[in-house]
Image: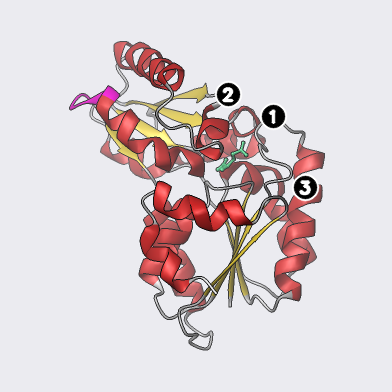
């Protein structure tokens, strides 16, 4: 049984990749919708939520946990590993390394929540893996909330994306790293704004491959998906088709 969680809907982008990589596995997905967004909260607040959710997932019998949230990973994956040393825990971190390796202009940007943008963990990741490539960090307040409210066609969001993308392209950026799992659902808008001038970098598939490596020893399940949320659990299933994840609905028990 694999536990996956996020502050809300964003982690469903990681869940989709996990289901594709591990179609037989059983999943528990937990959305912390009573506390979303995490991106404007303190490390202590995020740690408290992550430890509480990790405890719930462990209690449900999860023998692998995927923290499908960059903000929660940056602030609390270490605390979660310390609390559950017997459970393998996979975090999600922005794809600095692949983006830096692929960049021609040697200038890339990470789009992230305010919390991730100022985290020690992101700065260390850049120090260790940017390999001399310049990394700009762009906090994007409000983007995750738009996804959470399923307001993907709000013109104000499209304008904000367009303005930020143009400014970053003018600075010579050629890779846009999606440093928040909610932003995967903004990929169509971002791709439209970026055109052929740069590429997006998303790590959902890489995270799923890492989870598959670690899940190798787990017993096979029957491809079931349990959805949980700390507020409005009914919204989660209803959101699946609206996020182009209607195929996951058939697995929900
Ligand atoms: N989905 C989360 C991330 O990957 C956080 C969004 C939020 O709650 O602010 O960072």
Q: Which residues are magenta?
A: 193-197
Dot label at residue 40: 1
Residue 113 as seen in the image, left or right of residue 175: right
- Is there CB contact under 8 Å for labels 1 and 2? yes
Dot label at residue 90: none
Q: Residues within 10 Å of mark 2 (few under 14, many from 20)?
A: some
What percent of the width, then of the height, locates residue 169?
30, 16
| Nearest to the observer: residue 88 or residue 246 | 246
Can residue 172 be found in the magenta stretch?
no
For label 2, the SS is loop
Q: Give the residue at x 26% y 27%.
A: 192
Residue 143 as seen in the image, left or right of residue 37: left
For label 1, the SS is loop
Quarter of the rendering occupied by the N terminus: bottom right
Q: Earlier in the sequence, mark 2 or mark 3?
A: 3
Q: Which residue is most to the bottom?
A: 219
Dot label at residue 141: 2
Q: Which residue is most to the left?
A: 196
Dot label at residue 47: 3
In the displayed structure, 181 sits above or below 177; it is below
Q: Answer yes or no: disc 1 within 8 Å of ligand 1.
A: yes
Quarter of the rendering occupied by the C terminus: bottom right
Task: Report if residue 209 is visible in the image.
Answer: no
What percent of the width, then of the height, locates residue 167?
37, 11
Q: Give the residue at x 33% y 29%.
A: 190
């Amino acid at each position: 049984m694999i536990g996956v969680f996020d502050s809300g809907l964003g982690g469903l982008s990681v869940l989709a990749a996990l289901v594709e990589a591990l179609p037989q596995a059983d999943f528990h997905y937990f959305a912390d919708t009573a506390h979303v967004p995490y991106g404007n909260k303190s490390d202590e607040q995020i740690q408290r939520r992550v430890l509480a959710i990790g405890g719930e997932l462990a209690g449900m019998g999860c023998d692998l946990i995927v923290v499908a949230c960059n903000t929660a990973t940056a602030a609390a994956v270490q605390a979660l590993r310390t609390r559950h040393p017997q459970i393998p825990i996979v975090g999600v971190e922005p794809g600095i390394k692949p983006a830096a390796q692929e960049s021609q202009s040697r200038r890339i940007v990470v789009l992230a929540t305010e919390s991730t943008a100022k985290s020690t963990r992101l700065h260390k990741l850049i120090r260790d893996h940017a390999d001399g490539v310049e990394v700009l960090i762009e906090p994007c307040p409000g983007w995750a909330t738009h996804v959470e409210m399923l307001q993907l066609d709000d013109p104000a969001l499209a304008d904000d994306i367009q303005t930020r993308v143009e400014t970053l392209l003018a600075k010579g950026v050629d890779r846009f790293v999606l440093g928040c799992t909610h932003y995967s659902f903004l990929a169509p808008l971002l791709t439209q704004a970026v055109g052929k001038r740069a590429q997006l970098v998303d790590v959902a598939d890489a995270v799923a491959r890492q989870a598959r490596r670690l899940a190798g020893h787990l017993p096979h399940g029957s491809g079931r998906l349990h959805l949980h949320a700390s507020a409005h659990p009914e919204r989660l299933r209803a959101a699946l088709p609206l996020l182009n994840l209607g195929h996951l609905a058939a697995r929900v028990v």
